[in-house]
Image: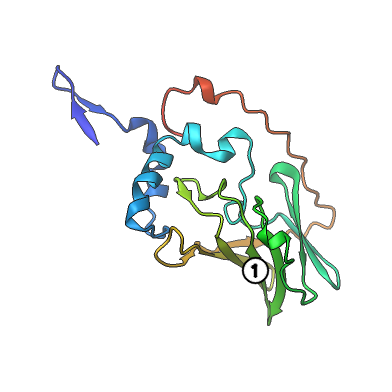
């Protein structure tokens, strides 16, 4: 949006957010109930203040995306993430959700996994409502239910997540798939991510988070 100043020149009032225009133009986005669109717009506009990842809080699921490395035992899959030096342990031995943990509200929820052919399906419930589905103010409720799918095809791995949140969404939201290629280097390691130490938000004058 633009407005003209007294001298007749167009002033770009959204100039500070223009670097995110491609992400915001993506047609694949969550469909919110009408009463929540104003909140989405507010969170997007005030992301410097409201975006949890901008203040050293976890990205959460599914925003964190696929892991950098996967380990598997007979009963568990371990997902390792370079960003934030995080890990998730997913049971794949057929157990149901933990009755107590699945009622907690945490950043990563309570997860169980199972194999469906060549696809690992991870079912997650028990989230808090502090994380975002993605960066453009796409919030969720603490009743969000996420299903992640990991499919390996040769040396590639495709990750995709479905977000089910009838409290705020009109329909399930399916993320764009992301495909990763296997690193053939047997000595490959994860580089340690530095601790998050946010010092800049109080001094930023535009609305853009980059």
Q: Judge from the rendering whether residue 19 lies leftward or rightward of residue 12; answer left or right.
A: right
| 187 in relation to 4, above or below | below
Depth order, front residue of 116/92 = 92
Q: Residue at x 64, y 53 (%)?
A: 105
Q: Residue at x 73, y 33 (%)?
A: 195
The number of callouts visible is 1
Q: Residue at x 36, y 37 (%)?
A: 18
Depth order, front residue of 158/57 = 57
Q: Residue at x 39, y 55 (%)?
A: 26
Position in image of residue 206 (x %, y %) = 41, 26
Q: Judge from the rendering whether residue 70 lies leftward or rightward of residue 169; answer left or right.
A: right
Rendering quarter of residue 193: top right
User: By what rule are the colours in the image chosen?
Assistant: rainbow
Dot 1: within a 10 Å radius of its alpha carbon, few (fewer than 14), some, or many (20 or more) residues?
Answer: many
Position in image of residue 68 (x %, y %) = 71, 54
Q: Judge from the rendering whether residue 130 lies leftward or rightward of residue 188; answer left or right.
A: left
Asked if residue 122 can be seen in this view, the reply is yes
Asked if residue 209 can be seen in this view, the reply is no
Rendering quarter of residue 30: bottom left
Rendering quarter of residue 16: top left
Quadrant for the N terminus, please.
top left
In the structure shown, which secondary structural element does the residue marked by tag 1 occupy?
A: strand
Position in image of residue 112 (x %, y %) = 71, 68
**Residue designated by label 1:** 123
């Amino acid at each position: 949006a633009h407005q003209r100043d007294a001298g007749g020149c167009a002033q770009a009032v959204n100039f500070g957010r223009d670097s995110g225009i491609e992400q915001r133009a993506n047609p694949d986005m969550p469909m919110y109930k009408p009463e929540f669109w104003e909140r989405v717009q507010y969170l997007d506009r005030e992301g410097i203040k409201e975006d949890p990842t901008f203040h050293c809080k976890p990205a959460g699921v599914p925003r964190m995306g696929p892991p950098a490395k996967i380990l598997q035992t007979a009963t568990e899959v371990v997902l390792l993430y370079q960003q934030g030096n995080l890990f998730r342990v997913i049971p794949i031995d057929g157990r149901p959700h933990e009755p107590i943990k699945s009622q907690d509200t945490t950043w990563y929820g309570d997860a169980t996994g199972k194999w469906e052919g060549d696809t690992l399906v991870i079912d997650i419930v028990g989230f808090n409502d502090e994380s975002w589905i993605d960066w453009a103010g796409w919030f969720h409720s603490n009743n969000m239910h996420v299903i992640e799918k990991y499919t390996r095809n040769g040396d590639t791995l495709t990750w995709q997540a479905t977000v089910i949140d009838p409290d705020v969404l009109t329909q399930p939201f399916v993320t764009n798939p992301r495909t990763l290629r296997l690193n053939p280097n047997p000595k490959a390691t994860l580089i340690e991510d530095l601790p998050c130490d946010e010092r800049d938000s109080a001094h930023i004058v535009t609305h853009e988070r980059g």
